[in-house]
Image (cartoon, rainbow, N blue to C red):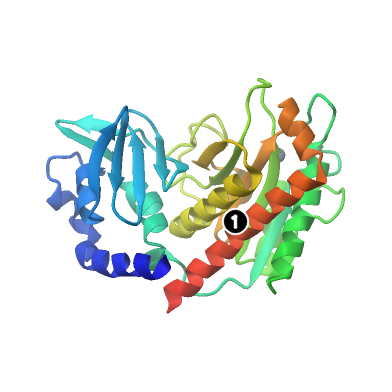
Amino acid sequence: MHSITRKLFLYNVVLLAGCSSVKTVEAKTPAGTVSLSYVARLYSMKTSMFGKNMVLQNKYNKLEVETNSRRAWINGVMVWLHEPCRKHGTQWTIREVDFKKGIDPILRSYAYAPKAMPRLVVIDPGHGGKDSGASGPNKVREKEVVLDISHRVRKHLESKNIQVKMTRSGDTYPTLDQRSAYTYKVGGDLFLSIHADGAASPQARGVETFITSASGYDSSNYYGQAGDKSSQRNNEHDAANAILGFSIQSNLVKASKRDDRGLRRARFSVIKKAPCPAALVECGFLTNPTEESLLNSASYRESVARGIANGVLGYFTLVKRARK
Ligand SMILES: [Zn+2]
């Protein structure tokens, strides 16, 4: 699969030589946007409408964008755009930032992956100590669930000779700033915060992965201080965040078999302040009775941990291949 993707990459490198020509190629779309027909041409994809969705597809990849919506799917995995896909004249367009800092890094990781191999992964089990996090109808507590999942992820990664450190290994509560400071101090090359969700509605369910919003853009929804569009330290890793987040979300959905809530954007403190590529994973809803009982079971925790670890390993593989 990757030798095929590589061929596509080499082909696209020619097409993309000077991506700054985006606006000149598509003069009809407003500044800061690209049309989906331009994206389709770039990847040699055919376009078709399927209900409300614009589908772009070639032999290797499928990009599906819901019109007038922020939802898109890359090879079947949901990815939230910073701004909705909108029609300008006859053209469906997305923000240039969503193409350059989301879709393109995911589809052509070779061109965007960091040059250095990560050495140290920092795992951050959410909450702890005085902060129990979310809890469900049967009082299963987030801080305990995510600590166990984190230890399991650590074991999987260490079994592949990847060095791992944790911001907490017991029932303690490092502050959010202490978690970021720790990652900086130990020289973390990859940061992974692990959580379980809570919502007012017991119907809410599924798994999701967050990365920092691009500078100038809001979160995917109410999460992470809505209205905050500031530039953050972690924004220098925008492309790597997308590669990492997509790899984790794809593997997490597959391993957990839960609903795909997508790769989303938010300025959660621990990811926006991370000095390295970073993602925050939500492993299911404790407020959903079915998912609470899953999150309370060793077998589900192990599946989720395997999914997250496979996502990290997938990211390592993409970085390694980009170096060749
Ligand atoms: Zn949490």
| Residue bearing the label numbered 1 | 274
Residue placed most toward the observer, 124 or 158 = 158
x and y, in percent, of residue 251 in the image? 58, 52
Q: Residue at x 83, y 43 (%)?
A: 144
x and y, in percent, of residue 311 in the image? 58, 57
Residue 142 in view, yes or no = yes
On-image quarter of the C terminus: bottom left
Q: Quadrant of residue 269?
A: top right
Residue lying farthest to the top in this orientation:
201
Q: Is residue 88 left or right of residue 102?
A: left
Q: Quadrant of residue 155?
A: bottom right
Residue placed most toward the observer, 35 or 22 = 35
Mark 1: secondary structure: loop
Q: Residue at x 42, y 55 (%)?
A: 106
On-image quarter of the N terminus: bottom left
Q: Residue at x 35, y 40 (%)?
A: 64
Residue placed most toward the observer, 215 or 251 = 251
x and y, in percent, of residue 7 in the image? 31, 69
Q: Is residue 11 left or right of residue 153?
A: left
Beta carbon of the mark 1 residue lies under 8 A of ligand 1: no
Q: Amino acid at mark 1?
A: Ala
**Which quadrant of the frame does ligand 1 lie within?**
top right
- Indicate whether 305 appears above or below 189: above
Q: Residue at x 12, y 40 (%)?
A: 28
Residue 286 in view, yes or no = no
How many numbered marks are there? 1
- Indicate whether 196 appears above or below 68: below
Mark 1 closeness class: few <14, some 14–19, many ≥20 residues within 10 Å: many
x and y, in percent, of residue 289 in the image? 75, 26
